[in-house]
Image: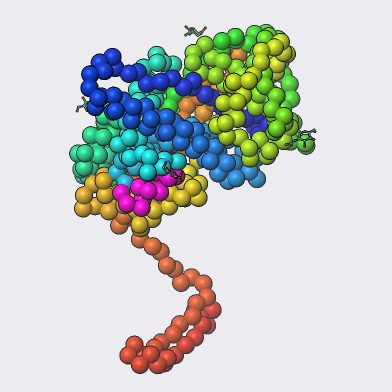
Amino acid sequence: MMRAALCIGILSALVCVGRSDRHDTDEDHTHQATALNSLSLVSSANKEFTYHLYRKLAAHTDSQGKNIFFSPKSVSVALAALSVGARGETHQQLFSGLGFNSSELTQANVDEAFHALLDRANKMSQKDTNEGTALFVDHDFTPHPEFLDVLNKSYFTEGFNVNFTNTVESSNTINRYVAEKTNGKIDNLVDNLNADTIMFLISYIYFKGNWDTSFNPELTKKDEFMVDENTKVPVEMMNMKEDVDIYHDQNINTTVLHLPFNSSSSMLLLLPDDMATLEKAICPGFVTKWLKWMKSRRYNIHVPKFSIKTSYMLNDVLIEMGMTDMFNEHADLSGIAVGKKLVVSEVVHKATLDVDEVGATATAATGIKIMPMSFHHTPILMFNRPFMVVITDRVTEDTLFVGKIINPNI
Ligand SMILES: *[C@@H]1O[C@H](CO)[C@@H](O)[C@H](O)[C@H]1NC(C)=O
Ligand SMILES: *[C@@H]1O[C@H](CO)[C@@H](O)[C@H](O)[C@H]1NC(C)=O
Ligand SMILES: *[C@@H]1O[C@H](CO)[C@@H](O)[C@H](O)[C@H]1NC(C)=O
Ligand SMILES: *[C@@H]1O[C@H](CO)[C@@H](O)[C@H](O)[C@H]1NC(C)=O
Ligand SMILES: *[C@@H]1O[C@H](CO)[C@@H](O)[C@H](O)[C@H]1NC(C)=O
């Protein structure tokens, strides 16, 4: 187990969307300008969302000495696709939770921006990166054609019909799909689908990068990793003496190592004097600064080889980020289907990271489980502890009896 002393970000360099060459009319120009502006607003919202979500997850796992690793992009794609079917306050909360400002962006702008982001991700990379979404729908349930259409066109969603009554078979179908998309890294996204699931929306991301300069396996040696002041664990420590990009940020006493992949992506490894200071401060502006100002110099670097897996139930952190209504009786998902009240019962997220001499592989999947409100929200009220009773006349409100039951047996 490798605790917090290593904080990792995998970045994709920002590239502008391809613009078509036919600049015919003013309308085209205006539309392109709006699209580019939306894309930049959505991209910067996604970056802010990253560290909001990170801090929430860190707060939830702080005392447990656990690794944190997740894909903010997978989470925001899944929630943005869900927001296509959300209305009213539920939609507002998803929008502002994701960092979108509804006076600057409409859902259609957001859909268009994600279309560009997903399209670019899958066009630029060949076999080594893969991002997408899928929707598993119960055979007894018919979503609004418009909802399916937007998901298909903007989020490249693959649609499947399943029989959720068959809980084992439908779980297996979803797990097999995610396993295939993540090259077997995530093979159990769901393990407890209930029969009343009506829809399951997923997003996945698979990333594989080869270091620009690989580590020499012969230099990898057994070493120790200091989990905390009192705990040491054995690791395989890789080693390289090369010109590498380094930045020492004195504001937060953190040294940043930039390890580029032989693609447009890079890994940043952040080694702070004090993890809490770094976790509190980190924001997109720091990353921009580090990438801009880092200097190449010869260093003797030691980086552990490791493989980790994480798993989160995101309901609580999303609620803390203001996305409350989709989980309760106020949920308004009427854009998904007419005449059926729906609610989100779970948002699960699983991720993996493998780092070795050759490169890194990172995968993640987010699953959003949607159920009919009636099934989900039958509130339970159990008088299984001391309670009071009052017997009253409804008309006169005369209290006929009052009491307290501490033990119903005597
Ligand atoms: C949303 O955008 C409007 C217009 O640009 C701006 O005035 C407002 O402050 C923004 N709201 C938030 C919460 O950023
Ligand atoms: C979107 O719908 C079209 C037309 O039905 C279909 O051909 C295409 O495969 C769908 N896209 C995805 C990603 O499933
Ligand atoms: C769905 O699965 C249930 C349980 O196995 C079965 O009774 C039902 O006939 C199936 N429905 C369809 C349409 O296949
Ligand atoms: C950084 O380290 C120096 C020297 O140990 C210390 O004086 C300073 O307070 C630290 N800054 C922060 C933000 O922790
Ligand atoms: C990156 O490195 C791998 C392994 O050496 C190689 O197979 C691949 O073609 C390289 N990709 C690029 C874009 O150079």
Q: Residue at x 40, y 64 (%)?
A: 380
Most common SS among magenta residues: helix
Q: Residue at x 63, y 20 (%)?
A: 293
| Residue 91 is covered by the magenta coloring | yes
| Quadrant of residue 133 within the rendered picture | top left
Residue 129, x across and y down, in percent: 43, 19
Residue 312, x across and y down, in percent: 50, 40
Q: Residue at x 42, y 67 (%)?
A: 381
| Quadrant of residue 25 within the rendered picture | top left
Q: Which residues are magenta?
A: 87-98
> In this orientation, which residue lies closer to the viewer: 65 or 88?
88
| Quadrant of residue 270 within the rendered picture | top right
> In this orientation, which residue lies closer to the viewer: 159 or 291?
291
Residue 169, x across and y down, in percent: 32, 37
| Residue 344 is covered by the magenta coloring | no
> In this orientation, which residue lies closer to the viewer: 292 or 335?
292
